[in-house]
Image (cartoon, grey):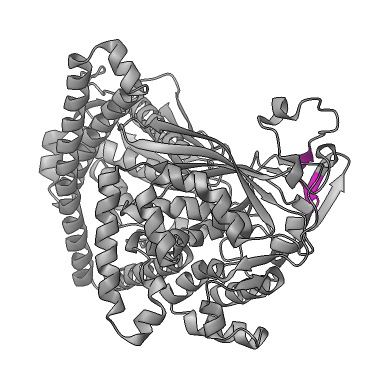
Amino acid sequence: MTADTVQSPLLKGITIRYLLAYAEENELYDRLIKSVHERLPEYDEARILDTKSWIPQKDFKQILRCFKEISGLWNPRNYNVLGKAIPTTGDMVPYYASMLAGPEAIIKISPRINHSFNTDQEIVIENISHEKDRLLMNFVTATVQHYMLPSTETPYLEMVTAALGYWEGVPQLWGWPETGETRYNEVQLTLAELVERDFAYLSFKYSEKGRDVLFNDKKVGEFVDVTVLDDFKMKFGYEPREEFLAKPLKEFRPVKIIEDVKISLDKKAGENTSRNSGNDEEIIFKKGELYGMPCNRYTVKIPEFSFRHRMYFFLKNLAANISLTKGNEDNRKRRFLKRVSPEIAMGYAMDAQRREAEKAAEANRRLAEEYKKRAEESLAHAKDIEKLLQRFAHDVGNTLGTATTMSALLSERVSALEHNTDAQELKRIIPNFGDIKYRSQALRVLVERSTRVASATRILLDNDPKKIDDLSQPTDVKTISEQFLKMNITVDNLIMANSAKNSAFPSDYPILKGNVHFEEGTYTLMLYEDLFTSALYNFYRNSNRAVNSNPNPLIYIRGWDLNDKIKLVFGDNGIGMNDETRRAILERRSVVSGEGTGLGYFTIWGLVDHYKGTLDIKSEKGKGCEVIIVLPKGNITTGSTNEYYV
């Protein structure tokens, strides 16, 4: 049994509100109303704001098209961010009822609510459960099956992504600053439909070759054969509701994505698309996702609050709304948009934020260029730069002082919890306690090391060579390099793993690798250890940024004993640099870059200059980078007594 075709599908006018909320927040409201009226003359502002009228799905798609043209938000995946406004832009009665009801009740009633808003969609709650996280916060989780019924109008991906945004925005009903979590891996629309309609602005060339699916002649997915499956549930973990299917189960031909498909963030409608390895990218299709499935299937996770907490926000918002209705006529007409909390406003204005961030970055770049120009024009202006760097180092020192205190407090609390709690009970209430303990220890080591690095930078900025000489001692650069790289790569990979685990759309992330190789020899130098570590830190920071786009990122350190000197090579397989940048660094013309403060190569040159060494750079754009330093051993004995810890 399959579903009947829905003739002329409809949706309630209230579903437009999340688009209006974004438009008003970004000063696009009047333009959107005008654009819709020009395209659909029967839709004036009163009709658009009428929440109870039914709108043909074909008209809504025209309204959505107007919104995309005005806002520039073409990627359907981004509409989960806009959808976060939905819980707080509804009519008054359901708004306050939801606030009092709580997340479990909202989830249970969602199929009926959805059906009252759409005639061509059905929601099925597969399961609901309760859980606690490691901080003992309560959550309600559910698996949702979202069916697009067969109809005379073609469906579109925003039906799903805006719904995901709704679930993510639910916690804002109770003043919670964090969003809920959603995750989907199964999409009902076929990949061919999405490329032809929803992502037509990218001009992908879609083709099939046997079991393979290709974009622009590059393989991105494979068909999954369900005709041979005797048990769909055994393969996919659930049984679809046949009464909502457009065709028999065995006629579906899902496609599984085998690698992330990305586009440049500045992609405009109508341009020929190309995948690149830059950092400014967004994902269109994620590795592991299935397209052409019987339904859209996703999980939701929403924080759970006590009735007392919900009642408090109910009364608080009710009082605020009464006050608002006493305002002017414009506020009364559009007050539903004004209920959007600051947290949601920041969330669904993702692209607006990104544009502002780009403007700020450009302003910072221009400011840095101005400082650079002034420094090149006059030594007096160069002293201004030095003062800026000194002030920066001072601020870093203050910040690290606070971080040291907090990391020490975290370590103490972890130790106290471990000492005062039975091991079995500790494992029960905090299953990942071992992971937390390791991370707190790693954090403390990193903060302590960073504090020493900041101290060395301040000494260098003070231009006190005698103090650097006094702090210099026999230092085993091989041991320091090995343990420094191991520690930082381990911590960075832990951070990446934690970020992926907590992401709403988790995907495979590249594992950062490090390699240290020193030829046979003696690698003890007369050095100020913290200054050398400061240089190591700046090499590592630059390399870590450079390898972000490489699927197999690598940072390495090499060493050679040249009898009275030591040669060190710090390299990576990142994006490299062009010859102009390389020469600017070697000629010391680059004081401040658009992404930093100028302390990077300032510190490195300080190390090289003080110990009368040499520095060279080998790099090509797109082919990685190697920074080569040669340092004299000085008048020291072999063997070093200093230790480096992890």
Q: Residue at x 57, y 66 (%)?
A: 266
Please say if 477 is above or below 45.
above
Label total for image: 0
Q: Residue at x 33, y 67 (%)?
A: 368
Please say if 272 is above or below 441.
below
Q: Is residue 221 magenta?
A: yes
Q: Is residue 199 visible?
A: no
**Residue 430 placement (x, y as % from top left):** 33, 23
Along the viewing direction, whichever of 270 and 252 lies nearer the viewer:
252
Q: Residue at x 37, y 26 (%)?
A: 482
Along the viewing direction, whichever of 505 and 625 lies nearer the viewer:
505
In the figure, is residue 300 to the left or right of 389?
right
Of the 4 image quadrants, the one containing the C terminus is: top left
Please say if 269 is above or below 621.
below
Q: Which residues are magenta?
A: 213-223
Along the viewing direction, whichever of 497 and 253 lies nearer the viewer:
253
**Residue 540 placement (x, y as % from top left):** 39, 40
Q: Residue at x 16, y 47 (%)?
A: 397
Q: Quadrant of residue 490?
A: top left
Q: Is residue 640 magenta?
A: no
Of the 4 image quadrants, the one containing the N terminus is: top right
Secondary structure, magenta segment, majority class: strand
Q: Is residue 387 visible?
A: yes
**Residue 541 placement (x, y as % from top left):** 38, 44
In the figure, is residue 447 to the left or right of 211?
left
